[in-house]
Image (cartoon, helix red, strand yellow):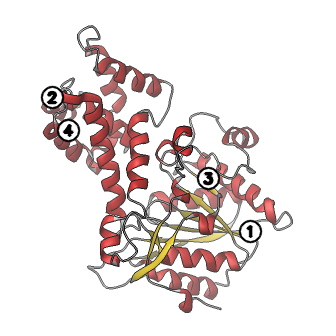
């Protein structure tokens, strides 16, 4: 494994990318509101990645994207490159079903503690090495799956194109945790209780508490904020969860709304009010300051090390592009396959605000960083 220089995700995806709000970065494509109206979908809230409505919207966007350069080549097949067996495979199957297409998904998560292994599960090609992507393409050739203008390939961004799961994903996670901590600390100032914050975050950021947090980092950040500020005792919260008196985030924020004393806590009240208003409006990304900070912390970890840094240091400290995915994308593009990137990361954590753009900031897919991994170009079928 080695470093293959500096590049961006846009090198192989250009602006054919959507983040959580399903708003295409390529301005030639329709906005989500237009897609939703055309498909008979609710305009709000925007569907999440594993929902059937997400699959319908993405299938329509893929057809629109294909029409930009190949208007007479209807899509018939779908490929998907991702990193999570449940979420990505569900999204893949929903998109494939919505388009009425055939296809295969490559799902990888690096596990160097086990021998290299691949497994076929229905329409999934599962691997514990990212370099097995070349085996996936040989498998497709054996299945007589054409790679041409009638094929679309979705490339998941987070922990696939960048921060490959099992290899480099912990750097993405550290950027997010740092963003939560710095946001809460910045809002509370001297009232910030770091020990209380870290205990709450570490305990609640577990799969067993997903029914309560909805696996939503905005919700988790708000909970840790209120615990750290003393608005809701952590032991009290754990007791309420264990006893069933508290089971959902909506219950938690409603409880804080009822117990918060605005006259005696002018510092915390406006923070709560802004987040509470967003939650009531159905915004799945209600804690905006946290997500803005997450964007800053994420891009700060991209491409900042020197070109002389070892691949081991790059993987440990920098968010890097997965070389195998990069080469696989070029292989597909050379054969006329439509490439499209998607991310479930909120737009607020992925796209700079206007004042940042004025200072030269770029969306995540245009942020330059190093590409690290194994070269598979010579092993790909011809």
319, above or below 182, in the image: below
**Distance from the alpha carbon under mark 1 to that under mark 2:** 55 Å
Q: Tag 3's secondary structure?
A: helix
Q: Are marks 2 and 4 in contact (CB under 8 Å)?
A: no
Q: Residues within 10 Å of mark 3 (few under 14, many from 20)?
A: many
Upstream in sequence: badge 3 or badge 1: 3
Upstream in sequence: badge 4 or badge 3: 3
Question: Closer to the observer: label 4 or label 1?
Answer: 4
Q: Are marks 4 and 3 in contact (CB under 8 Å)?
A: no
**Distance from the alpha carbon under mark 4 to that under mark 3:** 37 Å
Q: Depth check: give the residue in front, 192 or 382.
A: 192
Upstream in sequence: badge 1 or badge 2: 1
Q: Are marks 3 and 1 in contact (CB under 8 Å)?
A: no
**Distance from the alpha carbon under mark 4 to that under mark 1:** 50 Å
Q: On the image, numbered disc 2 is attached to which residue? A: 236
Q: Residue 267: x, y in percent? A: 28, 19
The residue positioned 39% from the left and 55% from the top of the image is 300
Q: Residue 333: x, y in percent? A: 68, 75
**Distance from the alpha carbon under mark 3 to that under mark 1:** 15 Å
Question: Closer to the observer: label 4 or label 3?
Answer: 4
Q: On the image, numbered disc 1 is attached to which residue? A: 76
Image side of residue 189 versus residue 292, left or right: left
Q: On the image, numbered disc 4 is attached to which residue? A: 197
Q: On the image, numbered disc 3 is attached to which residue? A: 55
């Amino acid at each position: 494994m080695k470093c293959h220089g500096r590049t961006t995700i846009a090198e192989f995806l250009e602006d054919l990318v959507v983040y959580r709000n399903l708003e295409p970065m390529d301005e030639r494509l329709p906005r989500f509101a237009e897609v939703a109206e055309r498909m008979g979908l609710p305009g709000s809230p925007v569907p999440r990645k594993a929902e059937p409505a997400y699959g319908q919207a993405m299938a329509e966007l893929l057809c629109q994207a294909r029409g930009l350069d190949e208007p007479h080549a209807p899509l018939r097949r779908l490929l998907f490159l991702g990193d999570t067996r449940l979420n990505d495979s569900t999204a893949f199957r929903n998109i494939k079903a919505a388009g009425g297409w055939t296809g295969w998904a490559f799902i990888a998560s690096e596990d160097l503690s086990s021998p290299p292994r691949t497994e076929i599960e229905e329409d999934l090609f599962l691997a514990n090495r990212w370099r097995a992507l070349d085996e996936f393409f040989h498998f497709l050739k054996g299945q007589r799956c054409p790679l041409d203008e009638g094929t679309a390939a979705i490339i998941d961004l987070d922990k696939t194109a960048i921060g490959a799961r099992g290899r480099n994903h912990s750097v993405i996670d550290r950027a997010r945790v740092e963003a939560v901590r710095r946001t809460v600390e910045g809002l509370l100032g001297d009232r910030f209780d770091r020990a209380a914050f870290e205990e709450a975050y570490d305990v609640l950021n577990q799969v067993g508490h997903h029914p309560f947090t909805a696996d939503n980092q905005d919700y988790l950040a708000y909970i840790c904020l209120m615990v750290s500020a003393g608005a809701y005792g952590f032991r009290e919260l754990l007791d309420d969860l264990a006893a069933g008196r508290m089971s959902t985030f909506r219950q938690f924020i409603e409880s804080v709304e009822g117990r918060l004393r605005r006259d005696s806590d002018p510092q915390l009240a406006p923070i709560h009010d802004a987040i509470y208003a967003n939650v009531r409006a159905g915004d799945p990304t209600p804690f905006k300051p946290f997500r803005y900070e997450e964007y800053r912390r994420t891009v700060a970890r991209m491409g900042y090390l020197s070109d002389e840094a070892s691949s081991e240091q790059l993987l440990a400290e920098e968010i890097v592009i997965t070389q195998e995915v990069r080469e696989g994308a070029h292989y597909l593009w050379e054969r006329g396959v439509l490439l499209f990137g998607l991310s479930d990361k909120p737009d607020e954590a992925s796209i700079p605000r206007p004042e940042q753009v004025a200072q030269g900031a770029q969306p995540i897919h245009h942020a330059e960083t190093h590409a690290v991994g194994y070269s598979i170009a010579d092993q790909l079928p011809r």
